[in-house]
Image (spheres, rainbow, N blue to C red):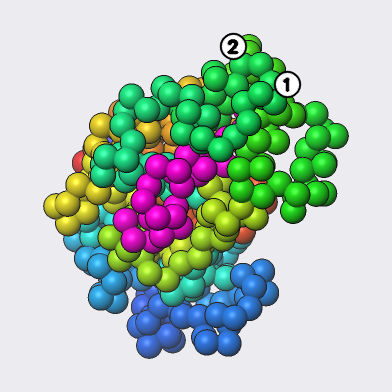
């Protein structure tokens, strides 16, 4: 009887809270003419870090159809526990979990929840930080689908693709650096702090393949021991150089035309390195809605509108737990694939396989194929602890 009574009280309280938050959501929608906040032409020219905070959070459980290639739906019709998500959205608006700019949820191919806070705008490409690495991995998968790379190529030395390097100056063991090793942050490249300072201070001296040549000359010898997991910027740079070498035209055009353009991502920024190649590990910017599209490639096994864009075999492996993520800032339960994280989230004693693109400050694409669920979060929070709320407040709303 006590259990039943407590359950009834909990349902009543939750229902009451749902009505309160729903009313707040409706009020916010009316205040913004039911339109998600947009960046103005003048704001579009300023730095993300100079963007003013929204006066009111925008929280919408029936996202508008913006004719951007995303189907939309209704959270009430698709979520058993709308109140939990609305509660989290209000807590984010109240900055209880840090400084976050958006929270979006897609279920069964439809965007069913959309919210913006602080610097979040529906049409503003948001800085992605290291989530860019995960997008680089998708580009590799696209090159593989088109036949410019094969699964067998993953085990070939990176230098076998880069013909204009001078191997007579390489340190020992460079041939051990394969695409597989580079994309699992296990290249084995190791530099002293003094060398890293030199790279940063004199970065203009290391352009194009000159940077790769410098990596392979100045590193300590590559050994089986050194090829453990180490999260560093050199590894994704190796991968982008290989992409540029194997695809027709430039890597920049390939990304634009063969990946992003194919899924309707036209408003974005992907900064170039001094080499002239897109930065493989950082500095891309995407809208939150377009992040949903990138996540859908994972939940749909590389397909977009019935077309196989990414090699399904590659993608399954790239988003699996190939190696252990061992940096002290990475959760103990996190594994690492090809620039994607993999972990298991437990809800009601059941474990769910979760794929995550993760960038510093709070950039997340969280994809669960079993639930056909995608959660996108953006932010500028130094601590970035929001993932705990995903398993606590979001997943339970969709677990039947």
Left or right of 24: which side holds 279? right
Q: In screen coordinates, is 233 left or right of 199?
A: left
308 and 87: which is toward the camera? 308
Give the residue displayed 46% in from the left and 33% down from the top.
161
- In the picture of the structure, the residue carrying the numbered disc 1 is 220
What numbered label is drawn on residue 125? none
| Image coords of residue 22 (percent x, y) | 36, 70
Image height of 218 relative to 397, above or below: above
What is the C-alpha distance between the residues marked 1 and 2? Answer: 12 Å
Q: Are marks 1 and 2 in contact (CB under 8 Å)?
A: no
43 vs 196, nearest the viewer? 196
Comparing labels 1 and 2, the label whose residue is closer to the camera? 1
Q: Nearer the viewer, residue 13 or 235?
A: 235
**Whether residue 16 is visible:** no
Under circle 2, the secondary element is loop
Give yes or no for residue 241 being in the magenta stretch.
yes
Quadrant of image for the C terminus: top left
Q: Residue at x 32, y 56 (%)?
A: 258
- Furthest residue toward right: 194
Give coordinates of residue 163: x percent, y percent. Answer: 51, 35
Residue under numbered circle 2: 224
Secondary structure state at the residue bearing disc 1? loop
- Magenta-highlighted stretch: main secondary structure? helix
Question: What range of the chain is rendered magenta?
Answer: 230-258
């Amino acid at each position: 009887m006590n259990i039943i009574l407590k359950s009834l009280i909990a349902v009543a309280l939750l229902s009451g809270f749902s009505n309160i938050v729903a009313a707040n959501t409706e009020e916010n929608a009316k205040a913004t003419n039911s339109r998600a906040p947009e960046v103005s032409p003048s704001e579009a020219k300023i730095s993300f870090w100079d963007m003013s905070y929204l006066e009111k959070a925008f929280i919408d459980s029936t996202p508008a159809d913006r004719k951007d290639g995303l189907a939309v739906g209704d959270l009430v019709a698709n979520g058993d526990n709308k109140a939990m998500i609305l509660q989290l959205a209000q807590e984010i608006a109240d900055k209880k979990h840090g400084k976050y700019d958006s929270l979006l949820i897609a279920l069964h191919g439809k965007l069913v929840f959309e919210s913006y806070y602080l610097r979040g705008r529906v049409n503003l490409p948001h800085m992605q930080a290291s989530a860019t690495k995960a997008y680089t991995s998708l580009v590799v998968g696209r090159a593989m689908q088109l036949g410019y790379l094969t699964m067998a190529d993953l085990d070939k030395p990176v230098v076998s693709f880069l013909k204009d390097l001078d191997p007579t100056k390489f340190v020992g063991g460079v041939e051990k650096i394969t695409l597989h090793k580079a994309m699992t942050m296990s290249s084995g490249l190791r530099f002293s702090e003094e060398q890293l300072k030199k790279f940063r201070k004199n970065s203009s001296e290391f352009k194009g393949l000159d940077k790769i040549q410098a990596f392979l000359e100045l590193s300590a010898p590559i050994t089986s021991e050194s090829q453990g997991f180490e999260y560093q910027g050199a590894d994704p740079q190796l991968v982008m150089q290989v992409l540029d070498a194997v695809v027709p035209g430039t890597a920049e055009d390939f990304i634009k035309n063969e990946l992003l353009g194919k899924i309707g991502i036209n408003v974005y920024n992907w900064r170039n390195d001094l080499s002239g190649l897109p930065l493989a590990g950082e500095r891309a910017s995407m809208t939150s809605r377009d992040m949903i599209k990138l996540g859908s490639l994972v939940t749909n096994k590389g397909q977009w509108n019935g077309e196989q864009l990414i090699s399904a075999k590659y993608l399954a492996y790239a988003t699996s737990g190939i190696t252990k993520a061992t940096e002290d800032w990475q959760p103990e339960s996190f594994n690492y694939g090809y620039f994607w994280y993999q972990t298991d989230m437990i809800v009601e004693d059941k474990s769910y396989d979760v794929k995550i693109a993760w960038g510093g400050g709070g950039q997340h694409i969280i994809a669960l194929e079993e639930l056909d669920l995608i959660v996108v979060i953006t932010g500028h929070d130094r601590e970035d602890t929001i993932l705990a709320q995903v398993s606590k407040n979001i997943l339970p709303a969709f677990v039947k």
